[in-house]
Image (tube, grey):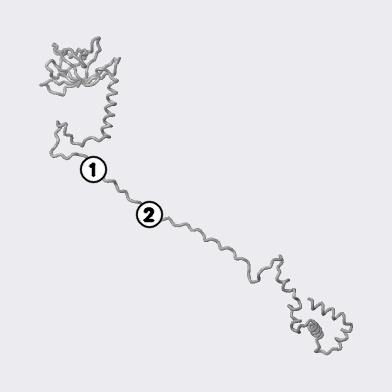
């Protein structure tokens, strides 16, 4: 730009330039002569004078600056975009076969080792093992409940046996007494006389409370008249007489 301005000023300052241009031969180069003279005055050769870098020393800085005024290294480009993370792929579930059920071993037998069969009358030799602590506690609770329920019943409730004066058993009675103040008493009888076939049973006809005790009336099988027990409390049991077949005998009533 500076060389061009100097060249234009030189041409304008020369009034005889058109005439000289007409008088110069076809091979003459007036611009080259001007540049040569300018280079000689500045101590430069002809190639350096024609070079755009030499004639325009501030061109490179102007081209180096970008539009925002920041100086950047022409050898470096824009920063690369960050790489995207890989897509998440869930792991496939691993199938495992279920563990087969293995039953626990059976408990050790608690039965005693017997060298001979146990007879039914050998109550001291049970065919089963001795009861455990849990079984004993359960049986104790059952017995306690039965005893508590029995305590709410009347004095005649339960099983009884009728014995004669010689101590032989005559009858067995099973009575139901709902407690003090109960009007209706129920019961059953069974023949237990020696020499008579067993299995004779029946229901008690009536049980009547008296001022001194209780009267129990029942009719044995094949008898013409009912048998009557007239009892009174005596020593934790009952005692009285048995009217049967037109005769009476002293008897006692004790719990079975």
Disc 1 packing (10 Å; few <14; some 14–19; many ≥20): few
**The N terminus: image quadrant:** bottom right
Q: Residue furthest right?
A: 15
Q: Height in image: 188 above or below 140?
A: above
Name of the residue lying farthest toward the top: 211
Q: x and y percent of residue 252 in the render?
A: 17, 16
From this viewpoint, which residue is outermost toward the front? 43
Across and down, in percent, residue 109 comes to 22, 41
Q: Position of residue 232 (x, y in %)?
A: 21, 12
Q: Which residue is mark 1?
A: 108
Q: Which residue is mark 2?
A: 96
Q: Nearer the viewer, residue 25 or 36?
A: 36
Tell me the number on the disc at residue 231. Answer: none
In the picture shown, does residue 89 fall above or below 166? below
Q: Residue at x 44, y 57 (%)?
A: 92
Classify residue 87 as left or right of residue 235: right
Asked whether disc 1 touches disc 2, contact meaning CB atoms under 8 Å apart, the reply is: no
How far apart are the two marked residues, 1 and 2, measured between alpha carbons?
35 Å
Quadrant location of residue 200?
top left
């Amino acid at each position: 730009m500076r060389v061009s301005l100097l060249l234009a000023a030189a041409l304008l300052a020369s009034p005889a330039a058109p005439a000289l241009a007409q008088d110069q031969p076809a091979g003459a180069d007036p611009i080259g002569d001007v540049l040569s003279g300018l280079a000689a005055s500045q101590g430069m050769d002809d190639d350096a004078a024609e070079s755009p870098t030499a004639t325009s020393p501030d061109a490179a800085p102007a081209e180096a600056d970008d539009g925002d005024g920041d100086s950047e290294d022409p050898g470096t480009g824009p920063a690369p975009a960050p790489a995207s993370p890989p897509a998440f792929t869930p792991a496939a579930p691993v199938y495992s076969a279920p563990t087969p059920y293995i039953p626990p071993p059976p408990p050790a037998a608690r039965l005693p080792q017997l060298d001979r069969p146990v007879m039914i009358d050998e109550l001291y030799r049970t065919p089963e093992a001795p009861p455990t602590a849990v079984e004993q506690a359960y049986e104790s609770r059952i017995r306690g409940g039965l005893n508590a329920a029995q305590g709410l019943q009347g004095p005649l409730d339960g099983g009884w046996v009728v014995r004669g004066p010689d101590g032989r058993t005559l009858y067995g009675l099973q009575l139901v007494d709902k407690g003090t103040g109960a009007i209706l008493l129920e019961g059953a009888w069974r023949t237990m006389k020696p020499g008579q076939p067993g299995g004779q049973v029946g229901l008690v006809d009536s049980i009547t409370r008296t001022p001194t005790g209780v009267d129990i009336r029942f009719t044995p099988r094949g008898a013409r008249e009912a048998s009557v027990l007239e009892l009174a409390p005596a020593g934790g049991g009952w005692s009285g007489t048995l009217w049967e077949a037109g005769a009476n005998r002293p008897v006692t009533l004790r719990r079975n």
